[in-house]
Amino acid sequence: MKPVIVVHGGAGRIFKEQEKACRSGVVRAVLRGYGILKRGGTALDAVEEAVRSMEDDPHFNAGCGSVLNEKGEVEMDAIIMDGKNLASGAVSAVKCVANPIKIARLVMEKTKHVLLTDQGAHLFAQAMGVPEIPEEKLITERSQERWKKNLEPDSNPEEFQKDLGTVGAVALDSEGNVACATSTGGLSNKLIGRVGDTACIGSGGYADNYSGAASTTGHGESIMKVVLARLILYHMEQGMSPEMAADTALDYMKTRVGGLGGVIIVNNSGEWAARFSTKQMSWATVKDDQLYYGIYTGERHTKSVDEAFASESEEF
Amino acid sequence: MKPVIVVHGGAGRIFKEQEKACRSGVVRAVLRGYGILKRGGTALDAVEEAVRSMEDDPHFNAGCGSVLNEKGEVEMDAIIMDGKNLASGAVSAVKCVANPIKIARLVMEKTKHVLLTDQGAHLFAQAMGVPEIPEEKLITERSQERWKKNLEPDSNPEEFQKDLGTVGAVALDSEGNVACATSTGGLSNKLIGRVGDTACIGSGGYADNYSGAASTTGHGESIMKVVLARLILYHMEQGMSPEMAADTALDYMKTRVGGLGGVIIVNNSGEWAARFSTKQMSWATVKDDQLYYGIYTGERHTKSVDEAFASESEEF
């Protein structure tokens, strides 16, 4: 089986001055994940690595760069899932760690549970030796400015909900296993303790070797109401292509609960899709040693992976 | 539309000396919920009332009577969902409140979010004026004994996982709306901050007027991996009866991830089912003014509702 990986850096509104950094960020993430697959690594390791790369990138709403809650704090959710046996790990409302996706992976591998939250997740991370970092290291000037702006009496809550974000990855490895991973800082100025779709299996992501893997982004509450990732796989089980399954599910979410979002998908034969109902979504894919990436509807750049690796430090 | 309500008091192992109290508890809960439906009330109010009744009953693993986490504390999860518009509310890892289902309902109705966790859920409950109660009021002698026994060096962790519990309700009201509600103390001796299926939309419950409503119970981690409640509704969307959908999904969960559980279902034309792959599940239903209830596979007692209301204080 030829490996495939798809990543997203969040659906929503991407400001003009952020576009280049977002394109570079998703390309860097997809190449890191692909490097693992190319060396015969697992889909699980590849999606974790890709997500970790975007958590470390301050341009995305996950890890460093996460938006702030009503109190000005960073509270993050993450999920990882192995399509081979449906093994899953997730965390919600975690603070002061660089890579929530790493803790999600540890929950999956070191506990009998699937989801740990808030104080319990913190204790678990400590017990696993995950280093605690000062909250300031996760907060960017941009996230702080947005938070302050949203606190102004004339702020339009509908407006800032457009900046959605979340990062994610799906992959198919050479053994035919699929996996997904998703990580987020959630919604700007959210209530303390608000958990979105990302931590909920079936909503923020789902992976099943019988069909494929999906990672979602967008308005979390809407995604949860329609259990978006599982819905997409269900459509694929019924014979739809990844693209058709994505569009059908995103249309349904818009019609039924008025929510916008985006998804990336790979099926178990290597077909993939990156689709969104928002204005933009940064995404990148590698398949057959070709890199594809874009931000706007219809935008699709192509490069050979060798060329991309050689120019990784450049802008895309 | 003739109203229907089904409740469960948890799938798992029910000890002989608890059977009578469990039968009485589910019958009391279903009658309370049915009382609301009979007066023209909504499915949403009926499932909340039924679940609240079992949260207040110390014989069930929810509210008072919840099992204890590794530290000997009560941490509870709950969910409620309205099939009309997929509006949902949930809480995870909440402490020191009598009725988590009430806070889940408040999350649904008073916030733009769906799920609040731990410290944030606590702050929200305070802001809503939900009274805080001392933890001791939620802890029974039975839950404390079990916790201590599980801490003994020769305890068998697989053994105590058989005592699963969770309570739930699904209903169809006279307007044709369906709703579900589920509430739990989780797994005995769970890690601090462990969140199970109950707080996750699609796993612990799902309600959609297009098909019906389901509430699940059993091994939470397995239920999450297969997104059990949503899976059942998919099967119903494909034309399966509630009973067939439940059995198909429970069989799949057993085969794919080795998990046992139980479900209650009502579809949008009033057909219902209470099915389980565990040894027992306490359940009760009212339809067409007839009460049905049982605990063992094949056990199904029938009474008229008038007779049941008259003898509500008696044992069943």
Image: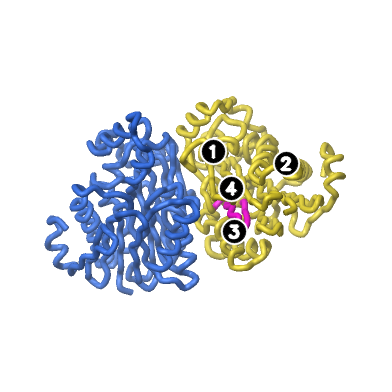
Chain colours: A yellow, B blue
* Picture coordinates of residue A112, whole percent (x, y): 46, 40
Question: What are the residue bounds of the magenta stretch?
Answer: A203-215
**Displayed quadrant of residue B128:** top left
* Picture coordinates of residue A80, whole percent (x, y): 58, 44
- What chain does badge 4 belong to? A
The amino acid at mark 4 is Asp
Residue hosting label 1: A109
Residue hosting label 4: A82
**Displayed quadrant of residue A279:** bottom right
Residue hosting label 2: A36
The amino acid at mark 2 is Ile
Q: Earlier in the sequence, mark 1 or mark 2?
A: 2
Element class at badge 1: helix
Identify the image quadrant of the N terminus of chain B.
bottom left
Query: Is B161 positioned to the left or the right of A43 in the image?
Result: left
Q: Is residue A134 visible?
A: yes
3D distance between C-alphas at marks 2 and 3: 23 Å
Is disc 4 on the same chain as disc 1? yes
Is disc 2 on the same chain as disc 4? yes
Element class at badge 4: strand
How busy is the neighbourhood of tag 3: few (under 14 within 10 Å), some, or many (20 plus)?
some
Is label 1 in contact with label 2 (beta carbons under 8 Å)?
Answer: no
* Picture coordinates of residue B130, whole percent (x, y): 32, 42
Dot label at residue A210: 3
Residue nearer the viewer, A178 or A292: A178
Residue nearer the viewer, B15 or B33: B15
- What chain does badge 2 belong to? A
* Picture coordinates of residue B272, whole percent (x, y): 34, 68
